[in-house]
Image (cartoon, rainbow, N blue to C red):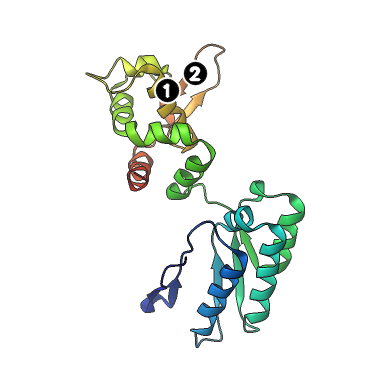
Amino acid sequence: MDSPAQVLPERDLALRTLERPVDAEGFADTVAASLGASDSDTVVVYLDALGELIADAGCEETVAALERLRDDLPSSGVVVCGIDADAVDRATFERIEGLADEVVGPSEGDVGGAVERLRRSDPTNFGYARRHWREARRGIERCERNYPKAKQIHRRLADPATTPRTLGATLKAFVDLGIIDVWSDTVGPTRYDLTAYDARRLLEAGEALDANG
């Protein structure tokens, strides 16, 4: 099921989202309807998270939908595909490149995208981060060490809801989200590099995690 288009006339922009799982034919019909509603000869179609369409509908069906899109576009139309090259095999990626005017990958600065990738790739640590990101933030900001273990950060908390283990899982999620780093000079328990702590990114990630609640 697709949502009604959200039209932003001041930006000459129309946004439409599709509910997963996505059917390739339904996807093509939705794009065609959007193109039919436009009276402009200069159309840019941006297809975000194309890898999810491939995961739901399959490679051949997705390529067929893109071929139909190219046929439906005016000659001046542009197709931009957002896809993670690591999420598909090389042959599939090259076929998509041949049908798109531009292929873009996920942005490292895209916090919402990073949270969504964490939700898909590591749902366990995503769950811990969603529940405990505020407590982990307090522990980080109270910790006086640059390269602490999870239990050393945990000791800085008063009446914590986490254990050292669940706090460690949350901190691992923070590493995946680009909020802190790991100090690699150790063969023992993981030490976290708090010199790389990005407080603003944590707040942005926290908002995105809360929105997934």
Name the one closer to the observer, 42 or 39. 39
Identify the mark at residue 41; answer none if there is no mark: none
Tell me residue 212's x, y (percent): 37, 46
Residue picked out by circle 2: 190
User: Callout 2, which amino acid?
Assistant: Thr
Do residues under tags 1 and 2 come within 8 Å of each other at their CB atoms? yes
The answer to whether residue 202 is above or below residue 142 is below
Taking 36 as reference, is 89 left or right? Answer: right
* Of pointers 1 and 2, the one earlier in the residue sequence: 1
Tell me residue 94's x, y (percent): 74, 58
Q: CA distance from mark 1 to mark 2?
A: 9 Å
Name the one closer to the observer, 110 or 58. 58
Name the element at disc 1. Answer: helix
Taking 51 as reference, is 201 left or right? Answer: left
Name the element at disc 2. Answer: loop
Q: How many marks?
A: 2
Identify the residue at horizontal 74%, vertical 61% (top origin): 95
Graded by Cα atoms within 10 Å as few (under 14), some (14 to 19) or many (20 or more), the crowding at tag 2 reads: some
Tell me residue 12's x, y (percent): 43, 78
Instruction: Specify the farthest residue to the right.
Output: 91
Q: Tell me the mark number nearer the camera, choosing from 1 and 2.
A: 1
Identify the residue at horizontal 61%, vertical 69% (top origin): 25
Taking 66 as reference, is 176 left or right? Answer: left
Tell me residue 64's x, y (percent): 70, 68
Instruction: Specify the farthest residue to the top.
Output: 188
User: Callout 1, which amino acid?
Assistant: Gly
Q: Quadrant of the C terminus?
A: top left
The answer to whether residue 212 is above or below residue 191 is below
Identify the residue at horizontal 51%, vertical 47% (top origin): 108
Residue picked out by circle 1: 168
